[in-house]
Image (cartoon, rainbow, N blue to C red):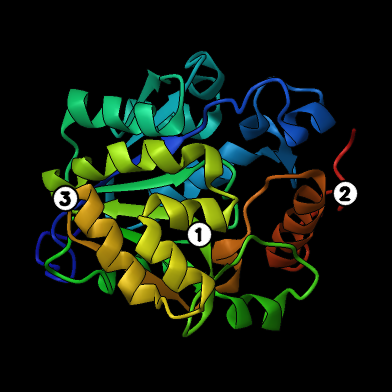
């Protein structure tokens, strides 16, 4: 894995895996009766273990740094134990918010180039990671993976996502980011401003400035214009990378997502292997 002769990637990425709690009101954790939705069962495995396995198998990923309030919750997982023995996994304590957790890891470990993803992204695949990394422009400091609305609806018309509607297309986030250079850290302060409004497109547009909000309201703001505006405010060159994988945009924010993702994971299983119940236990 991570063949040094492979020049298609700038060396092994460090993957930051955000597994922190969303608080006592998290609908998935409440539904499952657990402290962290990262531990929600999907097809017989904790959700976070699906993501760990994908990161471990991705040829672009060398080291993995998992972030959670109680590190022992991840350290006890079979995949985590194996990765720790191999010297590939570090589990560290979360800060009060995702953006602060990422900043903490960046400051403590300087893990560049870095990928950032979340424990509620169990549909993440190595193909998604490879496709994303291969299409990040060479001159950017921060990149985010996004999916077009038509890409998602063509395969999963029943899923409800938050869409940002621009002049040229509507997109949804995919919970996969890259910080190829240390300058990408500059984007963390901007992320903190948006954190509470990540599901509110109008408020996020306002954070980019009143003129940007006007363009957004009039549908004259394109996706690439938005990336440029983010880069200027964050003092970091930014890019939004479109994915061809509809499942890249499906994370687990509510019980309906948990049911859908469990069904998709079961459908991916090779023929003859046992399938988990498509409806997670309450």
User: Would you name the residue on which mark 3 appears?
Assistant: 235
Residue drawn 49% across and 76% down?
Answer: 166
Comparing marks 2 and 1, which lies closer to the viewer? 1
| Spatial separation of the CA atoms under disc 2 and disc 3 | 47 Å
Q: Residue 47 appears at what percent x and percent y?
A: 63, 40
Mark carried by residue 277: 2
Nearest to N terminus: mark 2 or mark 3: 3
User: Would you name the residue on which mark 1 appears?
Assistant: 174
Q: Residue 147 appears at what percent x and percent y?
A: 51, 71
SS at mark 3 in the image: loop
Comparing marks 2 and 3, which lies closer to the viewer? 3
Q: Residue 237 appears at what percent x and percent y?
A: 18, 60
Residue drawn 37% across and 27% down?
Answer: 101
SS at mark 2 in the image: loop
Comparing marks 3 and 1, which lies closer to the viewer? 3
Q: Nearer the viewer, residue 158 or 112?
A: 158
Asked whether residue 99 is in view, the answer is yes
Residue drawn 59% across and 80% down?
Answer: 151
Nearest to N terminus: mark 2 or mark 1: 1
Residue drawn 39% across and 74% down?
Answer: 223
Mark 1 is surrounded, within 10 Å at the Cα level, by few (under 14), some (14 to 19) or many (20 or more) other residues, namely: many
Q: Nearer the viewer, residue 232 or 247?
A: 232
Mark 2 is surrounded, within 10 Å at the Cα level, by few (under 14), some (14 to 19) or many (20 or more) other residues, namely: some
């Amino acid at each position: 894995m991570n063949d040094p002769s492979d020049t298609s990637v700038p060396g092994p990425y460090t993957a930051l895996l955000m597994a922190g709690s969303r608080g006592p009101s998290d609908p998935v954790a409440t539904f499952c009766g657990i402290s962290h939705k990262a531990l929600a069962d999907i097809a017989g495995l904790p959700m976070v273990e699906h993501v760990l396995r994908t990161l471990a198998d991705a040829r672009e990923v060398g080291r993995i740094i998992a972030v959670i309030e109680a590190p022992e919750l991840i350290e006890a997982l079979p995949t985590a134990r194996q990765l720790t023995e191999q010297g590939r996994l570090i589990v560290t304590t979360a800060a009060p918010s995702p953006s602060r957790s990422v900043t903490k890891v960046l400051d403590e470990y300087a893990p560049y180039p870095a990928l950032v993803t979340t424990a509620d992204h169990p549909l993440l695949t190595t193909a998604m990671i490879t496709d994303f990394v291969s299409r990040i422009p060479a001159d950017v400091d921060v990149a985010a993976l996004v999916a077009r609305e038509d890409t998602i609806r063509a395969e999963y018309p029943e899923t409800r996502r938050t869409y940002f509607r621009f002049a040229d297309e509507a997109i949804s986030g995919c919970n996969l980011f890259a910080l190829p250079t240390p300058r990408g850290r500059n984007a963390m302060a901007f992320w903190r401003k948006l954190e509470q409004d990540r599901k509110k497109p109008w408020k996020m547009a306002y954070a980019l400035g009143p003129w940007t909000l006007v363009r957004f309201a009039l549908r004259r703001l394109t996706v690439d214009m938005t990336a440029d505006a983010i880069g200027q405010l964050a003092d970091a060159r930014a890019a939004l990378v479109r994915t061809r994988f509809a499942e890249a945009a499906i994370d687990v924010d509510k019980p309906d997502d948990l049911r859908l993702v469990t069904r998709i994971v079961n459908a991916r299983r090779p023929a003859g292997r046992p399938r988990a119940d498509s409806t997670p236990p309450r």
